[in-house]
Image (cartoon, grey):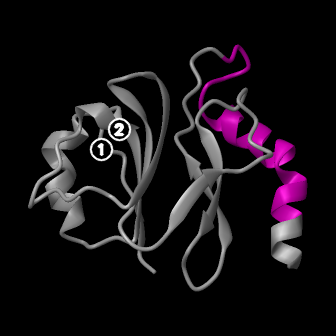
């Protein structure tokens, strides 16, 4: 499996073809525009599955499957941790939890970047521990 993450810094529709040359199975794109703005064609094929979250249609977090993988937001997702997504990934040789992260929560008075990761590690501690043990 090839998993690539790349902060495209916006306008993903203009840059997608370049990263897709790497043939990822799963692609995590921070600062990705809403999928309705993306244009799929022969150089930028449509993904088989995708998740996108964000408050701004110009910059959110996109997660794209270019393999047999299917995504579902994990039932323990905490919406207060804005753009840190625990994703249940199925359809491959094994199921797993993927944490897709764009640590950017401008509304959090405690801090919008590193503090988000710190909070997520504490909030998802049981999920992280249980996944390691199985």
Q: Is residue 38 left or right of residue 108?
A: left
Percent x, y of residue 85: 63, 45
Percent x, y of residue 23: 27, 73
Packing grade of label 2 (10 A; few <14, some 14-19, many >=20) is many
Q: Judge whether 95 appears above or below 124 on screen.
A: below
Q: Judge whether 112 appears above or below 90 on screen.
A: above
Local SS, label 2: strand
In primary-sequence order, the first of circles 1 and 2 is 1
Q: Judge whether 60 appears above or below 41 on screen.
A: above
Local SS, label 1: loop
The residue carrying mark 2 is 32
Instruction: Identify the residue at horizontal 54%, vertical 30% (top origin).
Output: 104
Q: Main secondary structure of the magenta part?
A: helix
Percent x, y of residue 14: 13, 42
* Distance between mark 1 and mark 2 Cα atoms: 7 Å
Q: Which residues are magenta?
A: 108-129
Residue 128 colored magenta? yes
Instruction: Identify the residue at horizontal 63%, vertical 41% (top origin).
Output: 84
Circle nearer the viewer, 1 or 2: 2
The residue closer to the viewer here, 13 or 30, is 13
Packing grade of label 1 (10 A; few <14, some 14-19, many >=20) is some
Q: Is residue 109 left or right of residue 5?
A: right
The residue carrying mark 1 is 8
The residue closer to the viewer here, 26 or 121, is 26
Where, by quadrant of the figure, is residue 42 drawn? Answer: bottom left
Q: Is residue 36 left or right of residue 14?
A: right
Residue 127 colored magenta? yes
Q: Residue furthest left?
A: 42
The answer to the question of whether label 1 and label 2 lie on touching residues, with beta carbons closer than 8 A, is: yes
The residue closer to the viewer here, 76 or 68, is 68
Where, by quadrant of the figure, is residue 111 drawn? Answer: top right
Percent x, y of residue 30: 42, 42
């Amino acid at each position: 499996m090839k998993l690539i993450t790349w902060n495209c810094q916006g306008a993903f529709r203009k840059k997608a073809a370049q990263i897709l040359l790497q043939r990822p199975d799963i692609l995590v794109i921070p600062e990705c525009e809403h999928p309705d703005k993306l244009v799929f064609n022969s150089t930028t094929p449509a993904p088989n599955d995708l998740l996108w979250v964000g408050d701004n249609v110009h910059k959110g977090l996109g997660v794209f499957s270019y393999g047999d993988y299917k995504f579902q937001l994990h039932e323990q997702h905490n919406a207060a941790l804005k753009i840190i997504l625990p994703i249940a990934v199925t359809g491959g040789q094994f199921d797993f939890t993927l944490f897709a992260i764009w640590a950017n929560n401008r509304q959090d008075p405690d801090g919008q970047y590193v503090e988000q990761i710190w909070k997520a590690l504490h909030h998802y501690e049981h999920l992280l521990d249980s996944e390691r043990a199985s």
